Image (spheres, rainbow, N blue to C red):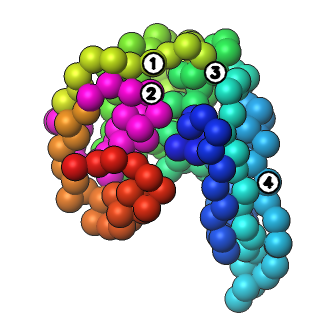
Amino acid sequence: VLTLLSKNSSLIIKNVNVNPSRKGIITILNKMGAKIQLKNKKSYNGEAIANIYIKGKKNFKSINCPANLNSSAIDEFLIIFLVAAKANGISRFKELSEMNKKESKRLDLGIRFLKLIGVKVERYGDNINIYGNPSLELSKNFEMKNFLKDHRIFFLSCITALTLGGKWKIQDKDSINTSFPNFLKTLKSLGAKIS
């Protein structure tokens, strides 16, 4: 998503598990117009792996996200919501109760985050509508705290800061140790300026 939302950017991620249960985010983003490609597909220890090719894109379509994709993208919905915030039109996501059974009530926190950055969101139980704004850019100061040390919120905050702008102070850096301790190092290797 960092690549998708960054102008004139491209990225290759090599040897990624792309079993159907793992690639819901790719399916959803491609439905929104991303054109992410899987190349050099092969099998490794019975698992499908491939190289993922991504290019930055200017315009995204809103989506009426099929609920049957939820389980294969449940950990990535926060970052998918960010793309929906930049899409043209209203994106609809339904039956997301599983998000609130994660390390935190992630659906609640995701909605709170979107509203914090000025995105219009409507919630109906476990369903949400996100009103996209292709011109969305941020210029004010943001301090991210009290998000229950959720590593996915930390990832989302960093990607939002790098793609939409604004000046950010993001707490709970230690939250990434549970899943992706090299996250900030990886961002810096791609050219991100983080202190």
Which residue is drawn at the image coordinates 33% and 47% (left, top)? 193
Q: Residues within 10 Å of mark 2 (few under 14, many from 20)?
A: some
**Residue, disc 4:** 37
Real-space Cα separation, disc 4 to disc 2, in angstroms? 24 Å
Where residue 90 appears, as percent x and y from the top left, is 64, 14
Question: Mark 1 is on which residue type?
Answer: Glu
Q: Residues within 10 Å of mark 1 (few under 14, many from 20)?
A: some
Real-space Cα separation, disc 2 to disc 3, in angstroms? 13 Å
User: Which element carries disc 2, helix, strand or loop?
Assistant: helix
User: Of marks 1 and 3, which one's residue comes earlier in the chain?
Assistant: 3
Real-space Cα separation, disc 1 to disc 3, in angstroms? 13 Å
User: Which element carries disc 3, helix, strand or loop?
Assistant: loop
Where does the N terminus fall, quadrant-wise?
Answer: top right
Q: Is residue 162 magenta?
A: yes
Residue 6 relative to residue 192: left or right: right
Q: Nearer the viewer, residue 62 or 188?
A: 188
User: Of marks 1 and 2, which one's residue comes earlier in the chain?
Assistant: 1
Where residue 191 appears, as percent x and y from the top left, is 44, 52
**Residue, disc 2:** 164
**Residue, disc 1:** 137
Q: Nearer the viewer, residue 138 or 154?
A: 138
**Picture layout, residue 152 above or below residue 130:** below
User: Of marks 3 and 4, which one's residue comes earlier in the chain?
Assistant: 4
Real-space Cα separation, disc 1 to disc 4, in angstroms? 27 Å
Q: Nearer the viewer, mark 4 or mark 2?
A: 2
Q: Residues within 10 Å of mark 4 (few under 14, many from 20)?
A: some
Taking the image as drawn, is residue 153 in sight? yes
Question: Mark 4 is on which residue type?
Answer: Gln
User: Which element carries disc 1, helix, strand or loop?
Assistant: loop
Real-space Cα separation, disc 1 to disc 2, in angstroms? 5 Å
- Residue 182, labelled with which disc? none
Residue 70 relative to residue 81: left or right: right
